[in-house]
Amino acid sequence: MMSKTTVLRRALLVSALSFLTFSQAHAFGFFNRDRGNDEAPIEEQRTSRSREYNNRSHNAGEIRQIAILLPLNGQHAEAAVAIREGFLAAYYANQQQRKPNIRVYDTTRGDVKQIYESAISEGADFVVGPLSKEDVLQIGRMGRNLQIPVLALNSHPDLFQAPPNFVMYSLAPETEAEQIAEKAWQKGYRSASIVVPDNAWGKRTANAFSVRWQHLGGKVVRSIFANPNQDQAAAVRKLLGIDQSQKRANDIKNLMSEKIEFQARRRQDVDVIVMAAPPAQARQLKPLFDFYYAEDVPVLATSSIYSGSPNPKSDRDVNGVVFCDMPWLLDTNKGAALRQLISRDGQEHSDQYSRLFAMGYDAYNLTGQIRVLQGQGQYAGATGNLHLGNNNLIERNLSWAKMVNGMPTQVN
């Protein structure tokens, strides 16, 4: 016998499907075409659809059909699913009567440029995606062959000049690192030490901060790459110069015959500590900063230190840390609706899933805001205050919070 919960979920699903138009249901894959009844060859069908697309008359700027290009299999599948779910959640949250049809294409099933062309032949007049850097580069290099606007969900350093109708939107760690550098400079700090995980993500973050910091005129005193699975105390001693202080004391003891008292000192030429670390590692690092005499040194951090869900018992260990993050995660009122959408399936989702869900949510709303951004306007999204920067790359201005009693408290 089915439980009441199961019956209710099935009833809700049936109710939701009843509101889909046939074309929307077809686009989402709720109906499968019977190719056995297709009389015309596939290429002829595509030519016919393309002719129909080119000949149809609709209001300028109106989007009739959106193609979402995502890698639904392989190493990026989990990220793709989170973005897709966020995109569709925003679609259904849109109360407008006239909404575009949505078609989802799996970019792992063929050449991404051919998939882009297929999407156009099947009626798309706007493309969201692709996601992988390699696919973004391929589509971006199509140049004048891009027939319809594209909102890519990543960027690539080798795409030096994006086509006018090719906009890139990503959650790259460089964004946070650069904004931390600007925040530190605005606060009057001039000498910074950096501690990040010893991995590719950590190195990207450290490099982005260093480049922006030094461009502003700041000095990087020391950069430490700490393995999250090893002793964090050794990394902090090295970061703060405690080991050097201890060595000097040992050298003096060896020279002096009598016994001397000694207390290690941290280096005094650091104005701010910049930390990028997952929550568990951050909860070890901050108490060690305090233990090794750096409790008076301000700490600025990336969003990685916060799981996205309040956890005051554990996050007390990072009290005092100021960090940047997506607005919806820091503003309880604004984030309530999005949290409800994320948890609607009754499952526990990771921090990464929630942030990518929000990216998908913003991506849908951005399809109607591209012209605003191109006109130097802004869009207040869940992932940040968004505006168009150099090379058609969307820039995210993040919100700031300070951890107080284990809870993020927004600050200016």
Image (cartoon, helix red, strand yellow):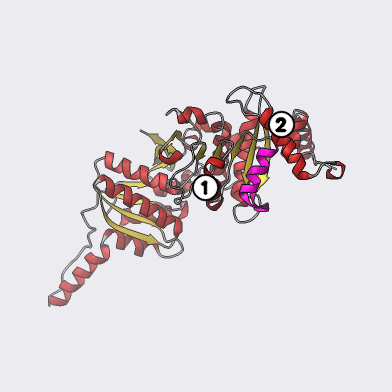
User: Secondary structure beneath disc 1?
Assistant: loop
Residue 90 on image: x %, y %:
61, 32
Which quadrant of the figure has residue 66? top right
Amino acid type, callout 2: Glu
Q: Residues within 10 Å of mark 1 (few under 14, many from 20)?
A: some
> Which residue lies at the image location 44% right of the left edge and 60% below the top edge?
199
Amino acid type, callout 1: Arg
Looking at the image, residue 348 lies above or below residue 148: below
Q: Is residue 120 magenta?
A: yes
Residue 382 on image: x %, y %:
51, 34
> Which residue lies at the image location 50% right of the left edge and 39% below the top edge?
167
Residue linked to disc 1 = 141
Residue 336 on image: x %, y %:
55, 32
Q: Is residue 113 left or right of residue 325?
A: right
Which quadrant of the figure has residue 88? top right
Considering depth in this image, is 35 or 268 the residue closer to the camera? 35
| The C terminus sits in image quarter | top left
Residue lying farthest right? 37
Stretch of the chain drawn in magenta: 107-122
Q: Are marks 1 and 2 in contact (CB under 8 Å)?
A: no
Residue linked to disc 2 = 52
Q: Is residue 157 magenta?
A: no
Q: Is residue 299 visible?
A: yes
Residue 206 on image: x %, y %:
37, 54
Considering depth in this image, is 350 or 77 the residue closer to the camera? 77
Main secondary structure along the magenta-highlighted residues: helix
Q: Residues within 10 Å of mark 2 (few under 14, many from 20)?
A: some
Disc 1/disc 2 C-alpha distance (Å) = 27 Å
Q: Is residue 297 visible?
A: no
